[in-house]
Image (tube, helix red, strand yellow):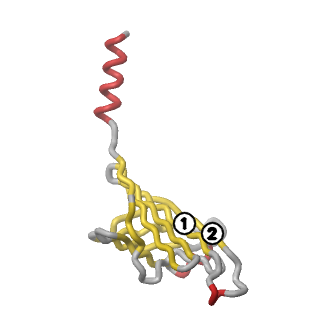
Amino acid sequence: MKKHLIVSILMLVSGGAIANTDHYLLRDGKHIHHLKITTLNNEVTVSADVDFEPNADEAGSNACSAEVSGEAKSTGENELVLKKHSESEASYCELKIKLTPTGATVEQSKDCDNFATGICHFSSDGKEMVKFK
């Protein structure tokens, strides 16, 4: 019995995959962007979420939150693309992510408006989201 337990533990340890997760954050006034990139073996998963309160120049706008996540594909060195299909529309939200040693920038397609409405958007507007652990 002890032998089977040891063999089972060794199989789990030897077959265990190592996951790496990086977090990125941008605070722009009352707008918060968060990006999480997880790499497990050759699979990359991206989760982007935003939480916006209206800034002074956005008076009359409502607060909003949005999230999109899924498997991302590498399109070049330090570049990822996440495509997420809208359940209510025949369109895709596409996030283009450019990584640097200290952060990341995000650009979104027009169809991401189906996921983030009002003042919310996933694009970092050219500003770098800071990488943290």
Residue positioned most to the right: 60
Percent position (x, y) of residue 34?
Answer: 49, 66
Picture disc at residue 10: none
- Of the pair 57 and 43, the residue shown nearer to us: 57
Q: Secondary structure at mark 1?
A: strand
Percent position (x, y) of residue 21?
Answer: 39, 55
| Image position of 23 with respect to 113: above or below | above
Q: Dot 2, how many residues are within 10 Å of its Cα: few (below 14), some (14-19), or many (20+)?
A: some
Name the residue type under label 1: Asp
Percent position (x, y) of residue 106?
Answer: 43, 75
Quadrant in the picture for residue 121: bottom right
Name the residue type under label 2: Ser
Please indicate whether residue 124 sits to the left or right of residue 63 in the image: left
| Image position of 11 with respect to 22: above or below | above
Task: State the separation of the CA atoms marked 2 and 1.
Answer: 7 Å
Q: Dot 1, how many residues are within 10 Å of its Cα: few (below 14), some (14-19), or many (20+)?
A: some
- Of the pair 65 and 4, the residue shown nearer to us: 65
Q: Which residue is mark 2?
A: 65
Residue plotted at (60% across, 77% down): 120
Picture disc at residue 49: 1
- Of the pair 71 and 47, the residue shown nearer to us: 47
Quadrant in the picture for residue 71: bottom left
* Labels in figure, total: 2
Q: Secondary structure at mark 2?
A: strand
